[in-house]
Image (tube, rainbow, N blue to C red):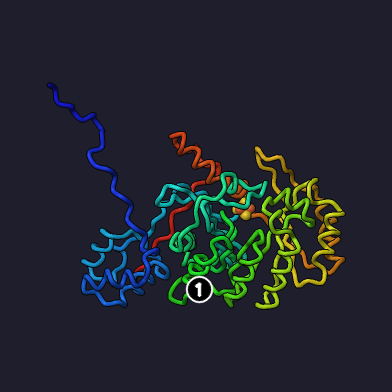
């Protein structure tokens, strides 16, 4: 009887499970782990400060920790649970876009936008999205899962690490200054974890980002808007309206059929009453669909008298999607109608247009390439510049 020989390249043992990301280890768990190694509890803050404030990207770089402890940490945890799967950089305006691969091989996107002395991180809160906005690739396959607190914080840290702490350019910030929660997913569907992540971002030993520099965007979940107001924070709320009446909005944001515009506006009014923070209404302007004079008048009627601001975001044509850019005259007419009704309005500049495409498209492309087992096509945009070196540990 012949023995069965192992095939060449047959794995002899299953691949090692990825180490847990340390930002997702609760403080008490980490304290217990440290106590087993006779390390004081204050090491928890030291480790976190190294990642959040000092830009350390490895345990080895944490030079204020004992060498043995650094080795033990590296054997048990990873500094980041995510991996940069793709990094695109728009040279025209220094916008960075990252596709991150999570420990379970799912992918998310996050973006760093730099202008006017600000560095703004746009982050995701879910894998996929259950809202199904018709112009958005993130929602095409529904929602897969909520991101963890650590996965949200990691996006901020990775983007912050792309800022240049030595910059003398007045247009560039040496650190992260603002956060917009407008990436993949509906942020209010993962509100508890988002609030935890933002608390870490706001900590003076962390990323030190003030509450008034944070904007949370939602398609409008009334109960969650009220929960956010009750959290007693000064975060800014942006409601993605995209249409001035329920029939049209349900076409563009299908989940609107369960809520309806009046309930969303009521909740947003309550948010303003409770926090004193003016609400922004985002309106993606889709040529020929929601940009007519009657739409502008309807929107003006809805919002005049409310403490509200409107951000108009002109759609940019995207291959494969049937929507088109609004003609300039329509856009200006829309702006004028709102202004004449006393509604504050601005047309939002688009950043990183050569790498932007539509929300979620890059991640989808990278996932499809990975599924097909192909090497990624060369990025249309330029390669990122040399990474900013991690700051020396204190
Ligand atoms: S636009 Fe935002 S809310 Fe709508 S499907 Fe995309 S990620 Fe979800």
Locate residue 5 relative to residue 192 in the image: left or right.
left
* Residue nearest the viewer, comparing 339 with 124: 124
How many numbered circles does the render carry?
Answer: 1
Where 301 falls versus 319 (above or below)?
A: below
Residue 9's spot in the image, x, y percent?
Answer: 26, 33
> Does the beta carbon at disc 1 come under 8 Å from ligand 1?
no
Q: Within the image, what quadrant is residue 237 found in?
A: bottom right
The quarter in which the N terminus is drawn is top left
Locate residue 304 relative to residue 94 in the image: left or right.
right
- Residue at image x 57%, y 55%? 185
Per the image, the residue denoted by label 1 is: 202
Secondary structure of the residue carrying tag 1 is: helix
Q: Answer whether residue 103 is visible to the viewer in this image.
A: yes
Q: Residues within 10 Å of mark 1 (few under 14, many from 20)?
A: some
The quarter in which the C terminus is drawn is bottom left
Where 30 falls versus 372 (above or below)?
A: below
Locate residue 38 relative to residue 240 in the image: left or right.
left
Q: Residue furthest front?
A: 258
Residue 227's spot in the image, x, y percent?
Answer: 60, 71
* Residue nearest the viewer, comparing 323 with 256: 256
Where 77 falls versus 306 (above or below)?
A: above
- Residue at image x 48%, y 37%? 369
Where 286 falls versus 236 (above or below)?
A: above
Residue 176's spot in the image, x, y percent?
Answer: 52, 66
Q: Residue furthest top?
A: 1
- Residue at image x 83%, y 63%? 300
Q: Answer whether residue 175 is visible to the viewer in this image.
A: no
Residue 392's spot in the image, x, y percent?
Answer: 35, 68
* Residue nearest the viewer, comparing 28 with 39: 28
- Residue at image x 87%, y 54%? 294
């Amino acid at each position: 009887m012949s023995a069965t020989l192992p095939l060449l390249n047959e794995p002899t043992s299953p691949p090692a499970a990825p180490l847990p990301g340390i930002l997702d280890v609760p403080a008490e768990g980490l304290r217990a782990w440290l106590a087993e190694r006779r390390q004081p509890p204050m090491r928890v803050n030291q480790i976190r400060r190294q990642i959040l404030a000092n830009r350390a990207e490895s345990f080895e770089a944490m030079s204020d920790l004992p060498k043995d402890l650094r080795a033990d940490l590296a054997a048990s945890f990873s500094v980041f649970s995510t991996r940069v799967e793709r990094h695109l950089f728009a040279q025209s305006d220094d916008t960075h876009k990252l596709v991150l691969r999570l420990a379970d091989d799912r992918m998310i996107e996050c973006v760093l936008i730099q202008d006017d002395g600000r560095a703004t991180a746009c982050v995701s809160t879910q894998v996929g999205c259950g809202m199904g906005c018709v112009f958005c690739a993130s929602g095409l396959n529904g929602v897969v899962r909520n991101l963890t607190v650590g996965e949200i914080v990691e996006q901020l840290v990775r983007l912050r690490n792309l800022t240049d702490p030595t910059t003398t350019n007045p247009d560039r910030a040496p650190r992260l200054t603002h956060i917009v929660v407008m990436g993949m997913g509906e942020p209010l569907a993962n509100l508890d974890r988002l609030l935890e992540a933002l608390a870490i971002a706001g900590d003076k030993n962390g990323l030190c980002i003030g509450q008034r520099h944070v904007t949370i965007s939602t398609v409008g979940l009334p109960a969650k808007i009220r929960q956010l107001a009750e959290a007693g924070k000064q975060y800014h709320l942006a409601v993605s309206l995209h249409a001035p009446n329920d029939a049209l909005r349900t076409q563009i944001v299908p989940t609107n059929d369960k809520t309806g515009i009046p309930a969303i506006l009521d909740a947003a009014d309550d948010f303003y009453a409770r926090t004193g923070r003016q609400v922004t209404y985002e309106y993606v302007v889709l040529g020929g669909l929601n940009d007519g004079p009657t739409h502008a008048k309807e929107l003006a009627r809805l919002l005049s008298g409310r403490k509200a601001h409107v951000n108009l975001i002109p759609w940019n044509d995207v291959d494969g999607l049937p929507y088109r850019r609004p003609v300039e005259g329509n856009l200006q007419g829309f702006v004028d109608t709102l202004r004449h009704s006393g509604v504050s309005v601005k047309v939002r500049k688009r950043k990183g247009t050569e790498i932007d495409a539509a929300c979620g498209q890059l991640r989808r492309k990278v996932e499809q390439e990975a599924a097909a087992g192909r090497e990624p096509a060369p990025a249309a945009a330029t390669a990122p510049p040399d990474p900013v070196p991690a700051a020396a540990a204190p």
